Amino acid sequence: MDLGARDPHARSERDARRHAERAKLHWDVVRATGVILDGGLVAEQGTREVAPQQSTTYILRVEWAGGTVWRSITVVVDQS
């Protein structure tokens, strides 16, 4: 599927965190009919602060009239 300008961008501020540190997720989507982050509706552009206890992958689902695209944001937690 050619997404052109619709290609969603999703990222974390840093890839690795120590146990219990916070991470900020960022996403930016254009002209979507629905944007869902881990099961909850969110705005097309946004951030969410998370503090996973272990390495966690967050799923961003973006829906357009022509289809659906998924992106993942992984926050790695160093357990040492």
Image: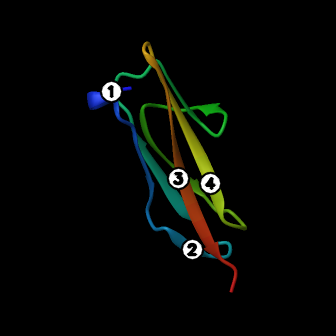
**Residue 5 falls in image quadrant:** top left
Could you tell me which secondary element the residue under label 1 belongs to? loop
**Disc nearer the start of the sequence (1/3):** 1
Q: Residue at x 44, y 53 (%)?
A: 11
**In the picture shown, does residue 48 fall above or below 70?**
below
Image quadrant where one finds the N terminus:
top left
- Verify CB contact (< 8 Å) between mark 4 and mark 3: yes
36 left or right, relative to 3: right
- Residue 21: x percent and y percent? 61, 72
Disc 3: which residue = 73
Disc 4: which residue = 57
**Disc nearer the start of the sequence (4/3):** 4
Could you tell me which secondary element the residue under label 2 belongs to? strand
Disc 2: which residue = 17
**Disc nearer the start of the sequence (3/2):** 2
**In the picture shown, does residue 37 fall above or below 55?**
above
Dot 4 crowding, Cα within 10 Å, few <14, some 14–19, many 20+: some
Disc 1: which residue = 2
- Residue 74: x percent and y percent? 56, 58
Please state which of residues 23 and 71 is positioned toward the viewer in this rendering. Answer: 71
Looking at this rendering, what residue extends furthest in the front direction? 1
Could you tell me which secondary element the residue under label 3 belongs to? strand
Disc 4 versus disc 2: distance between alpha carbons? 13 Å
Looking at this rendering, what residue extends furthest in the left direction? 5
Q: Residue at x 68, y 87 (%)?
A: 80
Could you tell me which secondary element the residue under label 4 belongs to? strand
- Verify CB contact (< 8 Å) between mark 3 and mark 2: no
**What residue type is disc 2 on?**
Arg
